[in-house]
Amino acid sequence: MYSYAELKHFAKQIFLKMGCSETHAETTATNLLSADLRGVDSHGVARLSGYVRLWEAGRINPTPNIRIVHESPSTAVVDGDAGLGMVVADFAMKVAIEKAKVAGTGWVSVRNSNHYGIAGQYAMQALEHDQIGWAMTNASPLVAPTFAAERLLGTNPIAIAIPADKQPAFVADFATTTAANGKLEILQRKNQDAPTGWMQTADGQPATDSNTVKNGGALLPLGGDRQHGSHKGYALGAIVDIFSAVLSGANYGPFVPPFVSYVPLHPNPVGEGLGHFFGAMRVDAFRPASEFKSHMDNWIETFRKAKTTSEADQVLIPGDVERQATAERLRDGIYLLEPVVKDLGQLAEKFAVPAPTAL
Amino acid sequence: MYSYAELKHFAKQIFLKMGCSETHAETTATNLLSADLRGVDSHGVARLSGYVRLWEAGRINPTPNIRIVHESPSTAVVDGDAGLGMVVADFAMKVAIEKAKVAGTGWVSVRNSNHYGIAGQYAMQALEHDQIGWAMTNASPLVAPTFAAERLLGTNPIAIAIPADKQPAFVADFATTTAANGKLEILQRKNQDAPTGWMQTADGQPATDSNTVKNGGALLPLGGDRQHGSHKGYALGAIVDIFSAVLSGANYGPFVPPFVSYVPLHPNPVGEGLGHFFGAMRVDAFRPASEFKSHMDNWIETFRKAKTTSEADQVLIPGDVERQATAERLRDGIYLLEPVVKDLGQLAEKFAVPAPTAL
């Protein structure tokens, strides 16, 4: 177990060594570690060395000139100048929030960026302003649309955070696939099969072997197959891709740059880097914030107290699971798998900084 | 088979007899019939008598004073004054489009409305303005969230229409459940079972009998069960509900008024009528429209030409199926089931107008 503060400090040192400014290193470490806190282990410090390799490959600019390149009262396009996704996303979300303060809502599409960790973190930045926050991103192609035997989309997550009053906020944050890649990695480690509807082989046949995607197969859109609504998951993933990249001028679909540095970039890119999309909606641009938030409390309480399918279960509100993980991990620490500990040790050596100390 | 013009004319006469203005009758008939054209038979003229019964029960106001009750540069809340959903939706979508012309985007939440037919029709209104259109609505509770043994949400559809250049527009329009209720009605008529993951019984057990929902069961959110991502479909349905009703002051969740007039209204409503949500995003508030649309063409062509899982299938673009249905039905006519023909005949008699003549 490692404390949040220890891991965040370590990550920050690495980003400083990469040449990031103090502010950027702090922002990146905070956003990276939010994944570990919220229980999305696949997107946290486990990926730190991946970001380092992208920087070594020249695909991440540690001192980006992030700027607005186009705007209207409620919209903007941001060019991330190939910066770390966490820094670019933080900048863009702040633009959306400021636009919303004046125009009621703010919508920002981003090009020339890199992977930004988890989406929910950015959507939640709107909450303290009594705004609804949105965050989406496209990602390296891993998903086959309905009837396709090719990887054409990323897991393209959607996060939406909605403030309440006495109740904690409603925070949905999910990949538009049946299961996120991180869930598959857990099964791979345990050498277990996955349920049906998660994956297909490289030639498009249904598969449950948890190594299928590693072996050239694809994840499936939410729904799994046509009979179970996979065309809807495909549409959602497509919408995230179009809002993140076609609106901004980033790469879309199969052209999105891979996260792993050893996979070459597409020889004929259709845009710059990968793309994100952010939104902020001021609640009182619709109705008084106190009214809205008290009805959100009632909405949440109504759903929480619903009759359940079994005594052991309860109806959850989006965000409940991640909130519980955060409380536990702030209290007990963050557990890292042995390969991750080793990975961080190698980074410590490479950059001549102290490795994180276990609790 | 009935011609589109014949059925639309008939529907319009009925709305005129209900006391609607010429303009409102025309708008309502056009939007109702768009469902028949697009192949969503459950939401077209088959529902005409349902709207009449809601009017007879005093739940639809044929001469509503639809108005903006709150606004900011990019947002508005519209009160539908209990009008027909098609008329209220048409008004609200126009507000969103006009807001977008000035502010870049426009977002309108609607209260005190009724069922509005299919969502896609309103989203598509943005296309001719080089805008991306959004339409959502909540609906009568039929869906059990993950782990719930109660109906708490409607099938709460999401429609998003995105313009392209030479390619036809991308038009996603889908219920946030595994399968729409209309699909179930088709199986009921054929006395066939449904696939797993569509429904559960009144006490929350998985079910495939296509009469399950009729008998007090519930539809399931997209994903079907927790293992297949139903918490994501639940989150989507919840977001539609909150944007449509908590932002506007309509009824949400289990409080949404039922479509069938014989089911009583909730004794303790939390708002007025049911709610919708519309959005319009001017493409050139992000990048020049010609650039965006030519990249949309490329996006669509890239996906269309993807390798497929079998020779018989092809990768479809959202909107393809409905576009084909529209072309066929404008050419060959619209087929109505015998009970629908009988229903329309009874309406003709009741209102003393000529029944529609078959082709």
Image: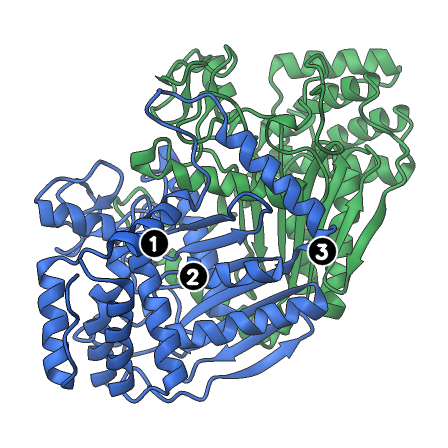
Chain colours: A blue, B green
Quadrant (top left, top right, bottom left, bottom right) of the N terminus of chain A:
bottom left
Q: Residues under labels 1 and 3: Cα distance? A: 29 Å
Q: Which residue lies at the image location 88% right of the left edge and 36% below the top edge? A: B64
Q: Residues under labels 1 and 2: Cα distance? A: 9 Å
Which of B236 and B318 lies nearest the eye of the viewer? B236
Q: Looking at the rendering, which quadrant does residue A280 occupy?
A: bottom right
Q: Is residue A23 left or right of residue A198?
A: right
The amino acid type, in three-letter code, at marker 1 is Arg
Query: Relative to A91, does residue B21 appear above or below in the rendering?
Result: above
Image marks 1 and 2: residues in contact by CB distance under 8 Å: yes
Determine whether the residue tagged by mark 3 lies in a helix, strand or loop: helix
- Residue B319 appears anywhere in the view: yes
Which of B343 and B1 lies nearest the eye of the viewer? B343
Where residue B215 sits: x, y (%)?
A: 50, 10
Which badge, 3 or 2, is on the more N-terminal residue?
2
- Mark 3 chain: A
Quadrant (top left, top right, bottom left, bottom right) of the C terminus of chain A:
bottom left
Are callouts 3 and 2 both on one chain? yes
> In the rendered image, which residue does mark 1 sit on?
A38
Query: Relative to B299, does residue A217 appear above or below in the rendering?
Result: above
Q: Which residue lies at the image location 44% right of the left edge and 28% below the top edge? A: B220
Q: Residues within 10 Å of mark 3 (few under 14, many from 20)?
A: many
The amino acid type, in three-letter code, at marker 3 is Asp
The amino acid type, in three-letter code, at marker 2 is Gln
Where residue A73 sits: x, y (%)?
A: 69, 73
Are callouts 1 and 2 both on one chain? yes
Q: Which residue lies at the image location 47% right of the left edge and 84% below the top edge? A: A66
Where residue B357 sits: x, y (%)?
A: 75, 21
Which badge, 1 or 2, is on the more N-terminal residue?
1
- Mark 1 chain: A
> In the rendered image, which residue does mark 2 sit on?
A121
